Amino acid sequence: MRRLFPVTDETAARASGGSAGGDGGETAGGGSAARGIGGSGGAPGGGLGGMAGGGALAGAGAGAGADAGPGVGARAGAGAGGDLADREWSLAELAVAYAYPEPGPGDPQPWLRANMVSTLDGAAQHDGRSQPISTAADMRIFGTLRALADVVIVGAETVRQEGYRPARARAEFAEAREAAGQGPAPAIAVITASLDLDFALPLFTSPTVPTLILTGAAAAPDRMAAAEKAGARVVIAGDGVGVDPVRVVQALGELGYTRLLTEGGPRLLGQLVASGVLDELCLTISPMLTAGDAQRIAGGPSVAVPKRFELVSLLEEGGFLFGRYRRA
């Protein structure tokens, strides 16, 4: 994997075989490698920012950082000098590259990012699933994004099609999550109006963290009772049968979840885009063509005015492009 954007004087010099600042060998502690999403990369509420702290990581206006935090983050500086080298990045480096932005003053506000994959011709899935258009590097990033998040938001249809299971606790991130005040694994939050879900699945019967069901106040009472009996926590985030995306974000924030991640599907992502609550998109471009009539990454009615996002970083491995875009 190699970084294509942003490019600093240092990384440009490396590409041409020269050096910047006379040395050209600075690591994350030295402070000139381009990284992350504006700032030292800390997570809202103090979170997993320790992972990114080893970096006076300069991308998009970053400043000098503190020492790397515990766990994964303590190793985060290992490869910052090799951004342009085509090699497998460690989980620590990926955690730095995808760290949530630092919160502003006062109470931390939720930050909602989406993680999606698309083929060259715009398909978000093949034969109803995203796995056929993914790759090992994409799955490493997928796992890292989950490890950084407080909660993973997913639509009920995606739960059914992809056979969702509980997020697992990962030893590589355990110390950092504990230091951040996070549980051992992110909760899964399922968005559903009908609650037409199999509550005998492990997602509901044996999660590391209780699964959340987000639905409307007018949803079927018997289905809400069935969800709670299975061990899920029902959260009301709308006045009708379904949810209001703005209230979803608010409700999760009130529960203490500020690092939000959604994995779609396309219908849910379209609703989040239309409501204006999406802060960031992590998009994998798969070098594949599928033709057919597969869904795009976001569906539903078109917005009145296209939402503008700006490129924050771009990585590449094996022809796959891994972009981060945030609200402009």
Image: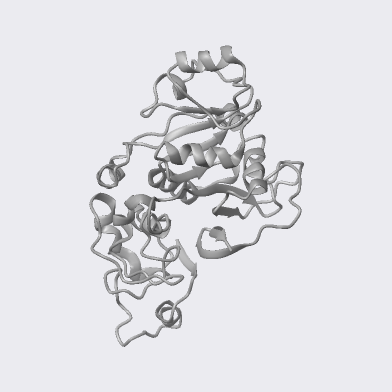
Q: Residue furthest front?
A: 106
The residue that appears at 66% across and 39% down in the rendered structure is 126
Where residue 290 appears, as percent x and y from the top left, is 70, 46
Q: In the drawing, does residue 202 fall left or right of residue 185?
A: right
Residue 270, position as x, y percentages in the image: 67, 44
Q: Quadrant of the N terminus?
A: bottom left
Residue 29, image x, y percentages:
26, 70
Side of 86 where 172 appears, left or right: left
User: In the image, what residue occupies the spot 64% across and 48% down?
Assistant: 273
With respect to residue 210, does 267 lie above or below? below
Could you say which is closer to the camera, residue 298 or residue 136? 298
In front: 29, or 293? 29
Residue 130 visible in this rendered orientation of the protein: no
Identify the coloring: one colour
Tell me if I can see residue 317 in this picture: yes
Q: Quadrant of residue 287?
A: bottom right
- In this rendering, position of residue 259 left or right of residue 275: left
Up/down of 171 relative to 32, above or below: above
Q: Is residue 249 above or below residue 120?
A: above
Position of residue 323 measured from the top left corner of the image (x, y, whole percent): 54, 59
List the single residue furthest toward the bottom: 22
Q: Residue at x 58, y 14 (%)?
A: 221
The residue lying toward the viewer, choosing from 52 and 328, is 328
Identify the image quadrant of the C terminus: bottom right
Number of numbered labels in the structure image: 0
Residue 125, above or below 204: below
